[in-house]
Amino acid sequence: MKIALVGAGLAGKQHIQTILSNKNCTLDLIIDPSQGAYEISKKLNTQYFSNIEKALEKSNPDGAIIATPNPVHKKNAEPFIRKKIPILIEKPLSSDVKSALDIVIHAKKQNTPVLTGHHRRHNKIIQKAKSKIQSGDLGKIIASHATCWLFKPNSYFNTWRKSLGGGPLLINLVHDIDLMRYLIGEIDCVQSFESNSIRGGDTEDTAVVLLKFKNGSLGTLSVSDTIISPWSWELNSNENPIYPYNKQTCYWIGGTHGSLELPKSKIWKSVDKRSWWEPITHSNYKIGKYKNYPLVQQLNNFLAVIENKEEPICSGIDGLNTLAVIEAIKLAAKTNTAVKPELLKK
């Protein structure tokens, strides 16, 4: 299958390598107005175009991966949807719920698959954790917590990352929110506080969030890109070699019969009977031998969706609903009230 890549930046380069290593597809073309993208295309001997319209006049790819800045996701998705070309859009689906909803509605009218690039769902650690939770091994899920503390140097912040939508809520916590939805269930209500006390500007650099799930479970999350720490999925999962690996925990999920640490895949349970006066022990469940490359699994799912062999692990609607929770978090912080996300049913 021929795959087009739109946007050859930080995320786009990772997708290029993933496509090149997959025997079931080829990198058909790169679309990006930058000189750097042109140089990459020349090196790879791949078709190059500066804009999507010109590319689709000359080529007809089987699918496209969009890895451009968040505010132009809708603009870049529309030409492919019009031609009924399936697309995988890097998270978040868009920079706001309204434009994300436009993408989903347009794609539904055209009967064109849209996937959202929340690649962590494809991590086998997460897949196994989901099966453990669904099996009832932990009992009824009561509470959860996720930490995403990291430090981004000044060199990270280009123009769009300094503007609204460029903070850690949409860039980082959106991943954690998506996994909490995937593992525990839909979110009914949120409360939050946010701050930009370190960098100032138009976007947050720190936030704390309270979650109430529709199944009655409660959750907390904390995110900051101004803290030196070893506690974040990027640093703890070992799924991306550009981040130094720290064998720490960043997610905790607690139930009436046991608790789960991720990404350590460690379950804590009572030795004999459930009581705080009784011993508790832990075990690491086995997930088998595998290479921890979620982007590879995500691409495989995308290719299978194109061929009508599988359903999306993370659909456009999934991406839309995760984005709706992020917008609710922003509104809750602004209004100092509890906010219900406006979720779209599948």
Image: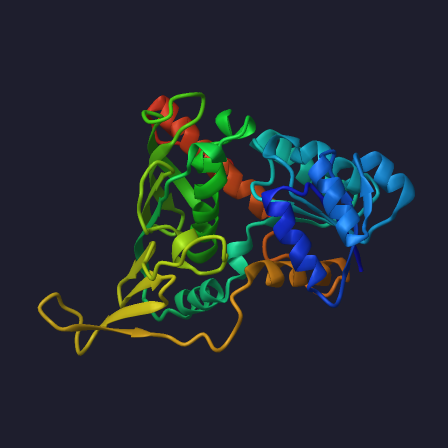
Q: Residue at x 63, y 35 (%)?
A: 101
Q: Name the side, left or right, on which 262 lies relative to 23.
A: left
Residue 189: % across, % down: 39, 38
Q: Is residue 74 above or below residue 233?
A: above
Say if residue 158 shows up in the picture. Answer: yes
Q: Name the side, left or right, on which 277 lies relative to 16.
A: left
Q: Residue at x 81, y 51 (%)?
A: 46
Q: Name the side, left or right, on which 14 lies relative to 54.
A: left
Residue 172: % across, % down: 45, 42
Q: Quadrant of residue 220?
A: top left
Farthest right residue in view: 58
Q: Residue at x 8, y 68 (%)?
A: 277
Q: Is residue 46 above or below residue 207?
A: below
Farthest left residue in view: 277
Say if residue 311 shows up in the picture. Answer: no
Residue 264: % across, % down: 35, 65
Q: Nearer the viewer, residue 185 or 83?
A: 83
Q: How is the image coloured?
A: rainbow
